[in-house]
Image: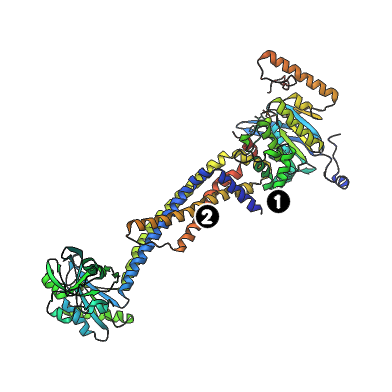
Amino acid sequence: MRTTRVDRRSHAPQIAIYRSAFMIQTENLHKHYHMGESVVHALDGVDVSIKPGEFVSLTGASGSGKSTLMHLMGCLDRPTSGILRFDGEILGSLPDKQLAMIRNQRIGFVFQTFNLINRTSALENVLVPLVYTRKNFSRKIARDALERVGLGKRASHKPSEMSGGECQRVAIARAIVNNPKLLLADEPTGNLDTRTGEQIMGIFHDLHAAGMTIILVTHEMEVAAQADRMIQMRDGKVVEDTAINAGRREEMLGSAQHSQQRMLREKAPPAQSPLTGTLAPNPEPRT
Amino acid sequence: MFHLKIAMMAIRGLRQNLLRTMLATLGVVIGVGAVVSAVSILEGAEKEILGKVESLGADRVLIFNGSDKKSHRAVQVSSLLPEDAEKITDENPKLIKSVSPQYNGGGQTKYFQKNVSGSILGTTESYADINDYQIAQGRFITREHIRGSAMVCVLGHKVARDLFGELPAIGKNVKVNGKSFAVIGIMEERGAIGFVEVDNQIIIPVTTAMGRMFGARYVTMLVAQCESAELVPACIDGIKKTLRESHRIRAGEDEDFQVFTQDQFKQQLGQVALIFGVVLYSIAGISIVVGAIGIMNIMLVSVTERTREIGVRIAVGARRWDILKQFLTEASIISCLGGAMGVVCGWAMANFLSKFTQVFKVYTPPMIIVLALVMAAVVGIISGIYPAIRAARLDPVQALRYE
Ligand SMILES: Nc1ncnc2c1ncn2[C@@H]1O[C@H](COP(=O)(O)OP(=O)(O)OP(=O)(O)O)[C@@H](O)[C@H]1O
Ligand SMILES: [Mg+2]
C-alpha cells in the first residue's frame, strides 16, 4: 500500500500543502562508497515511503546505513542509483541550488553532536538558516523558535554556557526556524542522559503533534518505541518496517529492560533509570 | 539585503576572533604602512628639493667647473675665473642681465665671546640682485669693495642675530677665520636660496675671499641671470661660446665647465626619484605578497577549523556560492582593515620620523592612499579565493563528520 504511486495531477487540487501523498519515497535506493579496491554498499536497495505527519524511528546496528539514508533524505548527498522522491519531486534531477532551497525551507536537521557554532549566541545559531532565506532577516522568528523549545530566556547564551540538553534544544530551534515539513534527527539523544533525552523527545512529540513529519535515528529502544512506526536496517537494507501499536510498544520496552538487565550483569553500566536500555545488538555480526 | 546579511555575518565572525583577525591583517598593515611612509618621505623630500631648485629661478643658468672626461676618472677640473663673469655679461648684452661669481668657503666668525660657524660666500655686487635677496640694514658690497679687496662683510640674518642679538652691528668689527672684517650690512631673513641656507652665510667680496682669505685661483661657480626664462637656451649657447674662447678650447675639444639650468636639475631629480620609486615599489610589492600569503594562511586555517560549521551551514540551506562569498568577504574585510590601518600607521610613522629627525618634510599624496586601499581590497580577494573555494567544495556529509 505504501509503495502505491500517487498520480500527482489528480491529487493536486485536494492536497494543498503536500504535492504527494508521500513525504519521502525511495525506490531501490543505493549508495556505494569506493574504498580503494572494495566497494562499501552503505545502502543496498532501500524502499521506504513515509507519509506526511508520520513519526518514524530508524534503528539498526552501527554501520547499517542509517546516517547515509538520512543524508540522502536530507538532500546532503546524492544516491548512487535508485529514485528518491521528496514530496513527489525526484531529487536526483534537481540542481544544487534547488536542493539548497529544499534544505533551507522544507527540511530541518538535528545531529547527535548538536553542531552549534560555539563562538556565537543561541540566537545567532538559530538565525543561521535565515541568512540563507531570501526573506527579511527577522530576529523575532528566531526568538519564537527558541520559545518553542523552551529557551526563550537563554537567547544570548553561548553554547559553552549551556548544558547538553539546552544545546540540543537550540539545535532543534535552528532546525525548525523555517517551519520545515520534515525533521530529520540523527541520534539526537545519543549524547544526553535519559532525563534530558526525555525532554528532547517531548519536544519532538510536540512538533509531531503540530503536524511535522519526523524521522529519528536511535539506538535506544525506549526512544524508538515512542514513534508510530519503526524501520530497522541491517547492512544497507530495510529488514523490518512495522507500525508501533500499544502491544508492540510494550514488547519493545520489555526487551529494552531485558537488555538493560543483561548489561547490568555483564559489566558496570553508567547510572541510568530502570527504563533505560539500549537496543539489543544485532545477533548476527556484520559481514 | 542578502549580500548584506552575509557581510554582517562575516564581520561578526571576525569580531569574535579579534586577535586572529588582527594577526591576519598584520602583513598587510606592515606592507601598506611601509609603502605609505616611504612614499610620504620620498614625495616630501622630492617636493622640498624641487622647491629649492625652483627657488633658483627658471631664468638662472649655473656654471660649474667641469670634470675631465678624457681620463675617464671623475677628476674635477678647475677652470672658472672671476673675470669670466664680466666677460659673459659683456659679450651677451641682449641675453644676459648679470653674472655673479661665487666662491664658497667655510669658517668661524667671532665677535668678542660669541662664535658662529657657517659658510662664507665670496661674490660681487650683482649677487643680491640676481637672487632678489634684499639688504635689511646698512648696504651691500660694492664694485669698489671688489676692486680693493676690501675687508668688509655682510651678515646673514641668523649670523647677525647670533653674534649681536639686538645690539647694533653696522660698523663693528668681527673676526672671520681670524681676520678682521667690518660689518657693512645685514641681509633680510630668507631661509634658503637653492641649496644654500643663506641666513647662515657671511658675504665678502670675491676678491677678498680668493686672495686674502682662501688663496684660490678659481671660483666655485658662476650664476647667470638671463633676460627671460625663454632665452635660457640662447643664453647657454652664448655662455658656452664666451667660455670656450676665454678658456681657449678648440673646436671638437671637451668643455672644462658644466652648465646647469633648473630644468636639468629637475630632470636629474626625476631620475633619482624614479630609481628610489622602483626600489620602493618592489619592496612594497614583496611585502604585499607576504601579506597576501599571511591572509591566505589564516583563511585556510579558519576553513579547516570551521569545517563542521561549513557542513552545518550547507545542511541548513547554504549554497556553495554562499559559502564562497562568506570566506571571500572575510578575507576582503581583513585585507581592507589591514590597508586602512596600514595607511594610518604609515602616515603616523613618516610624520614621527620627520618630527624626530627634523631632516626632511613629509607629504602623503592622496592618490597613494586610494591606491593602497584598492590594492588591499584586491589582495583580500586574491588571497581569499583559494581558501574560499576549498570551503565551498567541502562535502557536507564529510564536513559534518569532521572531528
Ligand atoms: N564517506 C564514506 N566512505 C566510505 N565508507 C563510508 C562513508 N560513509 C559511510 N561509509 C560506510 O557506510 C556504512 C554505513 O554508514 P552509516 O554512517 O550510514 O552507518 P550508521 O548506521 O549511521 O552507523 P552509526 O550507528 O554508527 O552511526 C558504514 O559501513 C560506513 O563505514
Ligand atoms: Mg550514524
Does the image show residue B293?
Answer: yes
Across and down, in percent, residue B370 comes to: 49, 60
Side of A31 relative to B340 (left or right): right
Q: Quadrant of residue A275?
A: top right
**Residue beneath the point at 60% across and 32% down:** A36
Image quadrant of ligand 2? top right
> Tag 1, which chain?
A
**Residue beneath the point at 42% across and 56% down:** B348
Q: Quadrant of the C terminus of chain B?
A: top right
Side of A39 relative to B149 (left or right): right
**Amino acid type indicated by mark 2:** Ala
Q: Which residue is mark 1?
A: A134
Q: Quadrant of residue B251?
A: bottom left
Across and down, in percent, residue B204 comes to: 17, 73
> Tag 2, which chain?
B
- A263 above or below A129? above
- Say what secondary structure mark 2 lies in: helix
Few, some or many C-alpha atoms within 10 Å of disc 1 (few <14, some 14-19, many ≥20)?
Answer: few
Q: Which residue is mark 2?
A: B377
